Amino acid sequence: MDFDLLCELAVATAREAGAMLAGERSARGPDVVQTKSSPTDIVTQMDQAAERLILDRIRAVRPDDGFLGEEGGAHEGSTGVRWVIDPIDGTVNYLYDLPDWAVSIAAQIDGETVAGAIDIPRRGETYTAVRGQGARLHTVTTAGPSRTPETRTPRVSTGVPLNAALVGTGFGYAAERRAHQARVLTGVLPRVRDIRRSGSCCVDLCSLAAGRLDAYYERGVQEWDIAAGTLIVEEAGGRVGGLHGAPPGPDLTIAAAPELFEALHDLLAPLDPARD
Ligand code: IPD
Ligand code: CA
Ligand code: CA
């Protein structure tokens, strides 16, 4: 299996969906068509349109692959390749026209992510990674009339002690979960440089990969939130995991350079961050 080809399809599709979402967001914002786990957990018609576009593009090239899309459920497939898709990560930001929202597409083989792309249209950035081949950050700078594409190799910051770390996090949609997340935060905030809450797990993981955050943790993120971002962070030199050696996932996801991962893990563990 050629991982590069999977990555190319992920990149082209994430960019097309990102461009569609940026271009077609009406001035008054998209309509909320559904709520999920709580009244603040929203789906817009644009989440659904973006997922349809992504699935159409992938199926046109690879009709027998499986997929897991946040808005469309799961399909098994017969090739061993499964696409894990968050059509808009940061839907609330998209609704409010804040810039931190992203399209995330990961390709997995037998459960392991081998290629991924996260497009952040309002930042003009696309992050990509192929397992074993490193991560890339593609930017389009629009200085004056020219659009200059650039590619660089993002790296997770190293050598940052916990008390100097800028830490990204996020909050779930359920009130009870948020109340405990706030209690955990009171144990973290006095021990680190500061906290950031971008509103997009994918943007947080890309920011970490690019050295714009030093660490990230969150309870409640799903496979579609973290599949591509985990590979991007790992290929940029970071470690992504859960509590006490568990894999990253809904219970807890922690990401940082390896030595800072340990320090943040040991700060979080006694705060009981994996319960509501
Ligand atoms: C959400 C964002 C947010 C995180 C939530 C996610 P959505 O994804 O990633 O930053 O805190 O846990 O559910 O709902 O915008 O796709
Ligand atoms: Ca998401
Ligand atoms: Ca989403």
Image: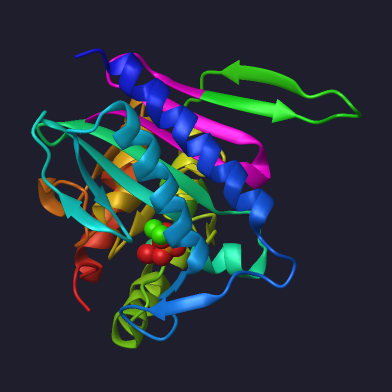
Residue 57, relative to residue 134: is it above or below?
below
Quadrant including the N terminus: top left
Residue 145 sits in which quadrant? top right
Q: Nearer the viewer, residue 71 or 221?
A: 71
Residue 150 image position (x, y, % from top left): 66, 18
Secondary structure mostly seen in the magenta stretch: strand
Residue 18, relative to residue 134: is it above or below?
below
Q: Nearer the viewer, residue 213 or 76?
A: 76
Q: Residue at x 19, y 34 (%)?
A: 65
Q: Nearer the viewer, residue 105 or 74?
A: 74
- Which quadrant contains ligand 3? bottom left
In the drawing, does residue 262 fall left or right of residue 24?
Answer: left
Residue 83 sits in which quadrant? top left
Q: Residue at x 39, y 36 (%)?
A: 57
In the drawing, does residue 145 fall left or right of residue 180?
Answer: right
On whether residue 91 falls in the magenta region, the answer is no
In the drawing, does residue 139 fall left or right of residue 241?
Answer: right
Residue 187 image position (x, y, % from top left): 37, 70
Asked whether residue 156 is in view, the answer is: no
Which region shows up in magenta?
Answer: 113-136
Residue 62 image position (x, y, % from top left): 26, 28
Quadrant including the C terminus: bottom left
On whether residue 135 falls in the magenta region, the answer is yes
Q: Residue at x 57, y 40 (%)?
A: 212
